[in-house]
Amino acid sequence: MKFTFCKITVLMFIFCVAGLQQANSENFSAKSSTAKAKAPVSEKPNWQAELTPLTTGQRTVLEYWEENTTLPGPVLGELRTFNTQNTLAASPSAGTKSMKEQRVLAESATAEDVMIMRCRTVNGENILPNGSASNVMESSISVSGRYVFYTGNWFAARSTNSGFTWSYVNPYTDFGNFCCDQVTIYDESRFRMFWLRQGVPGTNPYTGNYENEFWISVSHNRGATFYTYKFKPTDVNPEWTNEWFDYPHMQIGADFLYITYNLFNQNSSWTRTMIFRLPLDSLADNKALNYSYFSATDWFTWVPIQGADHTMYWASNWPNSSPQNSRIRIYKWDEDSDVVSWATKDVPAWSFTRRGNALCGDSEGNWAARYDQRILTGAQYYIRNADMKIPGRKVIAWWWNVQEGGGFLNPYIDAAAFYEDTLTLVEGNQGRPFIWDSETCFAYPSAAANRRGDLGLVFHFSNGPEKNPSIGFAIVDDCIAAPPGFTYYAVRNSRARPTDEKWGDYNTVRLFGPCQNVWAAGSHYLPTAGNGTCCNAAEPVYFVFGRKRDQESWRRWKGK
């Protein structure tokens, strides 16, 4: 299958409103709590050349819970409107570049030029059975050289040749109440692969408690076998009865695995948000373990940064008090401490976005209809602009979806960036690294920094009259003169829109290990015109990207 490799200038680091006062609240802190997880159970997935089809009953359950998870957070009766002082006076036009096939561009690339080093559909020769892949793909990946683990709704796949071919497993096989979220990540320091699977809520026949569970499966052989830890809300805290987990994020620090979750009650009302801190050494030893956790009830959806070291940062942009569209709370947890601290920061306001608010194109096949404004991704990186870079001073930033309006002609990806050492908003354009232009819709970002601290971003975009959701990426490094903007690249261009108006809920970009100079990513697209009418139309895609100067650090691991 041919695909295009195009680049278009996107205005990303655009502006910081003059005179914006960063009115920061006082810093607060609280001690975390502890709990214990039982010893894990052994698993050996039956990896197959073809995926076992879902039964009608399984698919019905999956489709129901796909629609009834990723639930919204607190919505107040009155919301502060978009601050008109933060609107754009005019929407600049995007630059253009002629479309070229990836192979032609790669052969002529200079050291600074961007390359797609691998791009393969995870579906192979249409191996995934009908109904096993959703337009809400929720792609997640972990990578260790030639070994790639890919999860999506509703399958898991494994490659031993850097994504050239795949084998498959049905997550239902040993997890009868599975659905739907899955996340995977690889710990390069301990050679362990982690696979999170979430179950549907239901009543425990022994206790009468309405809850669900999630599983953390750990592999020492890159996905061939696993041992699995299981967690329920009442395992964490016995007082959390009749609550269930939803919408996980998972990242790695120097010595701990971090998992964030929202919890909801029997009425699907949000009750709290929490973070787990699980010791990596204990997870690697295949033993029962003691772990720490922290929870709160005043900010919805916590997202940890990718690239943390001995301190984990996470953030929320959705408080349960007004205003709900101009503040970010940043949390900090040093790995040698049991105390969590936090501070609330004022940032440029955006249009408060609920599910169903955003419109990309027209209402038929509106692939932005499902998302809301919760933070989706965060990363720690360096600013390479000559006027901004301070040796050793890193930046932490978070990105989220926002509807059109307030001077933005299309849905876009908003963002805020802070100096790590002071947690103050970065000055000028770099403090708001949002992704937009006047002709294009953007959504579902994922961010990671490579070993040098260069930033890689993956997202969906659509432009032109059809507004089909396509896969794109961008790199922020020493080759980019930002502000005022930089270039993004198309990976696979969709030929249809999802007429069920379901898309997302997230993409994933990770460092390609062990070299960690280039990036690997999982996403999805619609390859055939007119096929966006069914829930299983999307194709999952695995790709590796970076600059030609780093191609050799990937080449030895590429397999075929």
Image: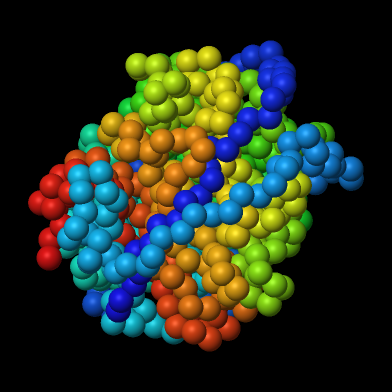
Left or right: residue 157 compared with residue 275: left
**Residue 251: quarter of image:** top left
Image location of residue 263, percent across then percent down: 64, 46
The image quadrant where one finds the C terminus is bottom left
Given residues 26 and 488, the one toward you in this image is 488
Residue at 62%, 55% in the rendered image: 438
Side (left or right) of 319 relative to 494: right
Residue drawn at point x = 61 percent, y = 34 percent: 15
174 shown above or below 147:
below
Instruction: Answer with the quarter of the image where residue 115 lies.
Output: bottom left
On the question of residue 268 being in view, the answer is: no
Vertically, is 358 above or below 26? below
Q: Residue at x 41, y 73 (%)?
A: 539
Q: Nearer the viewer, residue 109 or 193?
A: 109
The correct choice, above or below, for 389 with respect to 357 in the image is above
Look at the image and tell me in which quarter the N terminus lies: bottom left
Q: Is 383 in front, or is 45?
A: 383
* Residue at horizontal 33 percent and vertical 33 percent from the top: 478
Q: Residue 79: give x, y in percent of width and height.
A: 85, 42
Residue 329 position in % (x across, y down): 64, 28
Asked whether residue 329 is in view, the answer is yes
Here the colouring is: rainbow
- Where's residue 23, x and y in %? 72, 18
**In the rendered view, would you say 522 is above or below 325?**
below
